[in-house]
Image (tube, grey):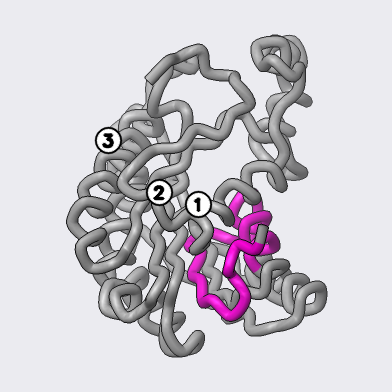
Amino acid sequence: MDLGLRGRKAIILGASRGIGRYTAAALAAEGASLAICGRGAEALARARDELAAEFGGLVHAAPADLADPDATRAFVAGAVEALGGLDILIHNATGQSGQDAEGWRNTFDVDVMAAVHAVEAAREALEASDAASVVFIGSTASKQWFGRWSSYGPLKGAMRVLANELGQALGRKGVRVNALSPGATLFPGGGWERTREANPEFFRGVERSIPFGRLGSGEEVARVIAFVASPAASWINATHIVVDGGQGKFVD
């Protein structure tokens, strides 16, 4: 299947590592031009150089503090200018969650409000595209209890509602908006790799909870994100997609 991504222009918020980095590679492999941001300038520059060397094409990169509304809007505006337009906006970044007031505020600012500010800044360019798509990367923590009380799950749930609202409203302008929630995903340097080292018994229990007996990979999640963002998924809008290998035992 041709996803129709060749020549498309994509912004990924939070792409210096993890699922965002895998998603950048998936889009670049399909021929998309990229604009990426992250908190750390060194990791971001490394990601930019690696993507450009492996796939060629345009890779614009700039650090951005997504907890800062002005910085978020400035990055998106600069990315649209560097790309010469915009077809795809993917919000993958997340804040430092916690159950105290600071944790709630940081998660709200990065996960929810950065999505709001980014869409506002990108809206004109997206509406000018003939295949515009926005994807918010959430978590299955928005659907089930994972044994700890924090701001993470509830505010990832808010992102799902926001995706529905925007998909309904902006769909009339030709802009699709969806939320996608990965389950436990294992990749180098990620949280689940640290969990495997620090608490191997718990990690094995999570593995056993998944029908395939393993965690997902960054590449597996990124391929679904690339599809949902692409013109090939033109009839998917204002919805929520779980990518967890059957880890969740819920039925929607």
Residue 151 at x, y percent in the picture: 35, 32
Residue 56 visible? The answer is: yes
Residue type at the position of mark 2: Ile
Distance (Cα) linking label 2 and label 3: 36 Å
Task: Tell which circle, 1 or 3, labels the residue nearer the N-terminal end.
Answer: 3
Magenta region, residue range: 2-27
Q: Nearer the viewer, mark 2 or mark 1?
A: 2
Which of 212/116 is in front?
A: 212
Q: Nearer the viewer, mark 1 or mark 3?
A: 1
Residue 108 is left or right of residue 22, and the answer is left
Distance (Cα) linking label 2 and label 1: 7 Å
Q: Which residue is mark 3?
A: 101
Which of 94/178 is in front?
A: 178
Which picture quadrant has residue 212? top right
Which residue is at a point 40% across and 33% down the rendered structure image?
152
Q: Which residue is mark 1?
A: 228
Residue type at the position of mark 3: Ala
Residue 189 at x, y percent in the picture: 73, 44
Task: Tell which circle, 2 or 3, labels the residue nearer the N-terminal end.
Answer: 3
Q: Nearer the viewer, mark 2 or mark 3?
A: 2
Which picture quadrant has residue 138? top left
Q: Which disc number belongs to residue 236?
A: 2
Question: Of helix, strand and loop, which one carries label 2?
Answer: loop
135 versus 75 height, above or below: above
Point out the residue furthest to the right here. 54
210 versus 68 height, above or below: above
